[in-house]
Image: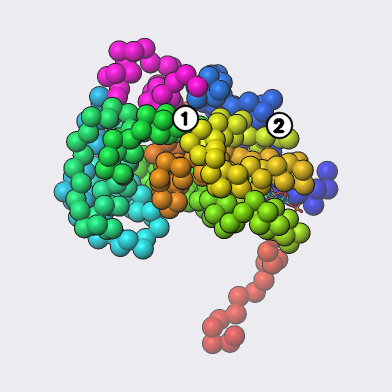
Amino acid sequence: MSMSEAKKKTGGLAGVVAGESAICTCGLGNGLNYYGYAIEDLANHAEFEEIAFLLQYAQLPNSKELEEYKNKIIAQRELSENLKTILKAIPKETHPMNLMQTAVAALGALEAEKEDFSNQDEKIIRLLGILPSVLCYWHHFVHFGKEIDFNSNQKSIAGYFLEKLQEQDPKEDFIKAMQCSLILYAEHEFNASTFTARTCASTKSDIFSAVAAAIGALRGPLHGGANEAAMGLIESFSSVEEAIEGVNRKLENKELLMGFGHRVYGLGGDPRNALIKVWSKHLGGETLIFKVSEAIENLMKEKKPNLPPNADFYSASAYHFMGIPTAYFTPIFIMSRVSGWCAHIKEQRANNKLIRPSSEYIGPSPRKFIKIQDR
Ligand code: CMC
């Protein structure tokens, strides 16, 4: 293989096997499996906390274990006064992903993990419990000057988040759709944010640092931020005809269509898309937003069959139909993916080797240094 072929092949590390993992298969025969369980079974028959347990302990819980696990998560919903003070200082113009990253970094400072990581499981449960509270507390404070409490009858993360965000009992359908979305987003092998978390953990850093680093990687529109960007695309059209015309123009201009394409899945597409589309259709099938979404999907199928929609495309409209502000789409991704990141952090730590690849040098040959006064 020539150097340029090799470079082309490994650009963005595409196709490079960067380590071993027992957690997830992604793209093998187009399937997505967590610890061997097919995503279709998990999304249709489980709740998110079962998946979080599976990712944390490598096995599905029985009913008693699940109830205990959920109670432990519920007990971790409260924010400390110090954390509230930090959140209150973050202005409403801040991107909510930066807010979430700040909160996780602050937890590292305020509630540090033990140096020997012996309380890593407690910290994972803390993150699962507190992240929805962080976003909702900040939301109500910066927009309405109100400090919410963290009491709720909702036992699930999905129900609790919806209740606290909207300050009303969530509809059962919304909770189920949110459960499905959290399950679909929970884990995805060596994606950019997970690899970032593993790289950070491989230096023997603490769990909050690794999760904060992962949030930074998730924020971008090529990764988690695509669900927000997809909503922006869909909402920019006021009719199906306008959408077809607009997408055709974007394709002619070689612009990226957010919510389409994937590094790993082939032509069969992202298996998460069909699962979340069912919920998007159920919640808003009669709306213009859904009709525009389907028109874009159909046009892409015809014009770019090699770029099927990914999980972010119909997640966007599903969240929109639940009344969630677009800026909170990617923070919801965090509430879910934190389970996958932490599974990888544990796995990395269990058999650690510093992740430190090499680069191919393409800079100047060795040359003589000229002192500043002579330059
Ligand atoms: N719209 C238009 N053209 C595209 C798209 C797209 N969404 N995705 C890829 N292409 C084109 C790309 O321009 C390139 O064309 P050319 O060969 O002429 O230069 C070709 O397809 C190959 O694309 P690539 O960028 O080399 O592929 P990649 O594996 O590096 O990128 C991707 C994968 C997901 C970053 C990319 O498909 C993309 O930018 N999609 C839009 C953003 C998006 O939806 N991201 C979410 C990913 S899945 C869930 C998640 O992680 O959150």
Q: Residue at x 29, y 18 (%)?
A: 67
Q: Can residue 276 be seen in this view?
A: no
Q: Which residue is drawn at 27% across and 58% down?
A: 142
The quadrant in which the C terminus is found is: bottom right
Crowding around mark 2 (Cα neighbors within 10 Å: few <14, some 14 to 19, many 20+) is some
- Residue 339 picture quarter: top left
- The question of residue 46 being in magenta is answered with yes
* Pointer 2 residue: 268
Q: In this view, does 176 lie above or below 229?
A: above
The magenta region covers 44-70
> In the depicted view, which residue is nearer to us: 30 or 43?
43
Looking at the image, tell me whether mark 2 or mark 1 is earlier in sequence order: 1
> In the depicted view, which residue is nearer to us: 200 or 306?
306
- The question of residue 353 being in magenta is answered with no
* Pointer 1 residue: 180
> In the depicted view, which residue is nearer to us: 207 or 103?
103
The quadrant in which the N terminus is found is: top right
| Labels 2, 1: front one | 1
